[in-house]
Image: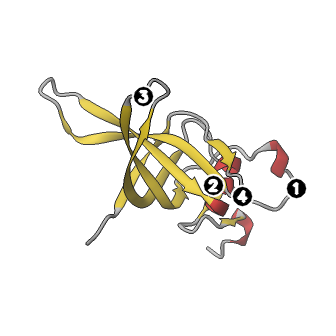
């Protein structure tokens, strides 16, 4: 069986970073992804897809991503259920990211100035300064 999702789109809002009770980082953001086929009126529609990242990747996304950034996300589709405060059952579809690749150059956050980090991330969430890339 296979559950693999690959998306390229832009963030619709700044990532929201939270921590579990055990201290593990979790970040959520929405990705706007244009459909490849136009609708009956000849316009391309956009899907807004919730993304979840965990651990070091979550911290990297929280530190270096912001609204409007272009990213590639690879991961798996997850469907989860929950109950609202008024007792209604809800289902949510979201992508749990294994990797997030930054596809454009963003602004470096103020808290990273002089820290030797760049604005690019590999599929594992590692951050590499632009000066360290050999080509």
Which residue is under mark 4?
A: 22
Closer to us: 54 or 122 = 54
* Residue 24 location (% of width, % of height): 68, 58
Instruction: Name the residue tied to disc 1.
Output: 114
- Provide the secondary structure element on which disc 3 rests: loop
In terms of sequence position, does the residue under pointer 1 or pointer 3 come before the other? 3
Is 66 drawn above or below residue 58 in the view shown?
above
Between label 1 and label 3, give the one nearer the viewer: 3
Q: Quadrant of the N terminus?
A: bottom left
Q: Is the Cβ of the residue at disc 2 closer than 8 Å to that at disc 3?
A: no
Q: Quadrant of residue 32?
A: top left
Identify the residue at horizontal 61%, vertical 41% (top origin). Answer: 15
Residue designated by label 3: 87
Q: Looking at the image, is mark 3 or mark 4 nearer the viewer? A: 3
Q: Which residue is mark 2?
A: 58
Front position among marks 4 and 2: 4
Q: Residue at x 61, y 64 (%)?
A: 125
Give the image location of residue 43, x and y in percent. Answer: 22, 28
Quadrant in which the C terminus is drawn: bottom right
Mark 3: few/some/many CA within 10 Å (<14, 14-19, 20+): few
Labelled pair 4, 2 in contact (Cβ < 8 Å): no
Q: Secondary structure at mark 1?
A: loop
| Other-residue count near label 2 (Cα within 10 Å), few / some / many at <14 / 14–19 / ≥20 | many
Precedes in sequence: disc 2 or disc 3: 2
Residue at left 53%, top 41%?
Answer: 29
Mark before the other along the chain sequence, 2 or 1 = 2
């Amino acid at each position: 069986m296979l559950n693999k999702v690959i998306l390229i789109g832009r963030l619709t809002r700044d990532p929201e970073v939270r921590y579990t009770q055990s201290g593990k980082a979790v970040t959520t953001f929405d990705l706007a992804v244009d459909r490849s086929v136009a609708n009956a009126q000849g316009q391309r529609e956009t899907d807004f897809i919730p993304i979840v990242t965990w651990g070091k990747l979550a911290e990297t996304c929280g530190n270096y991503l912001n609204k409007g950034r272009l990213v590639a996300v690879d991961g798996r589709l997850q469907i989860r259920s929950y109950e609202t405060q008024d007792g209604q059952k809800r289902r949510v579809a979201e992508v749990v990211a294994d990797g997030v690749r930054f596809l454009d150059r963003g602004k470096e956050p103020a808290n990273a100035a002089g820290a030797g980090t760049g604005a690019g991330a590999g599929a594992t969430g590692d951050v590499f300064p632009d000066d360290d890339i050999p080509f």
